Amino acid sequence: MTGKDQMSRRPLIAGNWKMFGRRADLSEIRALSAATTDAPSDLELAICPPVTLLAAAVEAAAGSRIGMGGQDCRAGGDGAFTGDVNAAMLVDAGAVWCIVGHSERRQGHGETDADVAAKAKAAMAAGLTPIICIGETLEERQAGQAAAVVQRQIAGSVPADAPSTVVVAYEPVWAIGTGLTPTLGEIADTHAAIRVALADGRQGAEGIRILYGGSVKPGNAAEIFRVNGVDGALVGGASLKAADFAAIIAAHPAAARR
Ligand code: PGA
């Protein structure tokens, strides 16, 4: 089902550790580094650990295929903002990616599309590649609004001048951490709707990767990766253990082509 257009976008598989992980868990990063040394070069790999582990994770993954990222950033420069971390600080710790607009931040911290766009811009200005998350709630899907919601989120959260290097992660809110996933047809349809929205007024939008996220596991990764328009995955719970994450990576068709 992989389209020709899709072949030109380098697949990305990124892990989101959320608020999990202690220094002892750096062994999982080391194990993942070892397990992915000969992962296909056309696959890009990332882990976004909690900010407390970021610098140590960069060190643990030194020389590996895995780039590290932040899970959020404050838009703006240094200042008197107790508890906040900005994109320049993430770069200083060795990050190359930054998740912005995860639903756990939109819902738990009241982040709006405009906030997310500002964070994406700040991440880009600092030299990070933002992974901009969008996704509908269960109520919105049941009301037949999934496509409209993600299209509105794209318009509001992905800066109009975003380069084709930015990444979008489609994460249905109801699929995150629940073990539930949309049908493969629903994933294909929503990715297609996102692609249409990205093309609206953005130069080079066909190069923007759209990841699927929400209960991606070793057991369902292969079928999800084969869905037309899916350029990789953003993986939460199953990225915490190197064995699970390595199994997801191995399930990508790029790995099977070798
Ligand atoms: P999950 O989380 O894989 O645990 O469902 C995905 C995410 O929130 O990025």
Image (cartoon, rainbow, N blue to C red):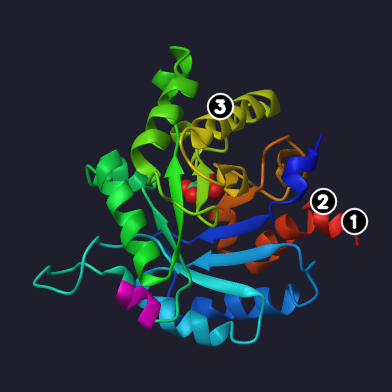
* 218 lies above or below 184: below
Callout 1 secondary element: loop
Density class for disc 3 (Cα within 10 Å; few <14, some 14-19, many ≥20) is: some
Q: Which residues are magenta?
A: 88-92
Residue at position x 26%, y 40% from top? 112
| Residue 120, magenta (yes or no) | no
Callout 2 secondary element: helix
Residue at position x 80%, y 75% from top? 38
Three-letter code, disc 1: Arg
Q: Are marks 3 and 1 in contact (CB under 8 Å)?
A: no
Rendered location of residue 188, percent (x, y): 66, 29
Does residue 177 appear to the left or right of 42 in the view shown? left
* 87 lies above or below 195: below
State whether label 3 is within 8 Å of ligand 1: no
Query: What residue did someone put label 3 on?
Result: 193
Alpha carbon separation for disc pair 3 and 1: 28 Å
Three-letter code, disc 3: Ala
Does residue 64 appear to the left or right of 96 in the view shown? right
Alpha carbon separation for disc pair 3 and 2: 23 Å
**Main SS type for the magenta part?**
helix
Three-letter code, disc 2: Pro
Q: Which mark is residue 253?
A: 2
